[in-house]
Image (cartoon, rainbow, N blue to C red):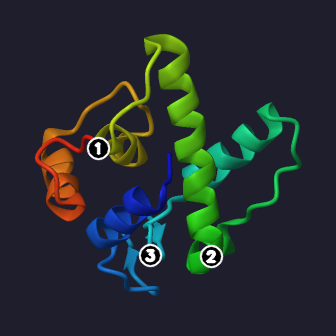
């Protein structure tokens, strides 16, 4: 599975591609509107996988590091889904996990916005 389609849709949904986008109410920054709790979560995932935590809050402003954090998070969510369900999640399910923090939680409004950006009615691939 390639995450490029998902991450492109997430960037469009979260910031419309604005590198300096900032949501003060949520302390969400950058093209993927990453909050500090997500930086911690991605570093936790790296530790679980035997890697050194490398991300800092200021990396939220860097598009390439933001994409990398998102990829690590989505890979982890995909693996959790496969382990429990025995099949790949849809693009929409993965994208929504970025918003909810969990592959098994849903947000219908967010899912509909993602599906419009992916260009499929239900995020199937």
Q: Would you say the residues marked 3 and 2 are in contact, meaning their CB atoms lie under 8 Å apart?
A: no
Any mark on residue 114, and which? none
Q: Would you say the residues marked 1 and 2 are in contact, meaning their CB atoms lie under 8 Å apart?
A: no
Residue at the location (65% across, 71% down)?
A: 65
Residue at the location (21% across, 64% down)?
A: 117
Q: Is residue 83 above or below residue 36?
A: above
Q: Disc 2 marks which residue? A: 64
Q: Disc 1 marks which residue? A: 92
Instruction: Say whether residue 114 is left or right of residue 81.
Output: left
Q: Residues within 10 Å of mark 3 (few under 14, many from 20)?
A: many
Residue 105, position in %: x, y?
A: 32, 28
Residue 19 visible here: yes
Residue closer to the observer: 71 or 58: 71
Q: Residues within 10 Å of mark 2 (few under 14, many from 20)?
A: few
Residue at the location (63% across, 49% down)?
A: 72
Residue at the location (36% across, 82% down)?
A: 17
Q: Would you say the residues marked 3 and 1 are in contact, meaning their CB atoms lie under 8 Å apart?
A: no
Question: Quick one: SS at disc 2?
Answer: helix
Residue 67, position in %: x, y?
A: 56, 66
Question: Quick one: SS at disc 1?
Answer: helix
Q: Disc 3 marks which residue? A: 31
């Amino acid at each position: 599975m390639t995450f490029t389609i998902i991450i492109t849709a997430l960037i469009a949904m979260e910031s419309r591609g604005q590198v300096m986008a900032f949501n003060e109410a949520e302390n969400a920054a950058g093209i993927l509107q990453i909050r500090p709790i997500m930086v911690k979560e991605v570093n936790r995932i790296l530790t679980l996988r035997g890697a050194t935590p490398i991300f800092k809050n200021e990396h939220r402003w860097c598009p390439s590091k933001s994409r990398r954090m998102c990829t690590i998070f989505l890979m982890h969510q995909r693996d959790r889904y496969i382990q429990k369900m025995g099949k790949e999640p849809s693009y929409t399910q993965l994208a929504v996990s970025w918003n909810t923090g969990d592959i098994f939680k849903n947000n219908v409004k967010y899912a509909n916005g993602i599906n419009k950006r992916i260009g499929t009615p239900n995020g199937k691939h």
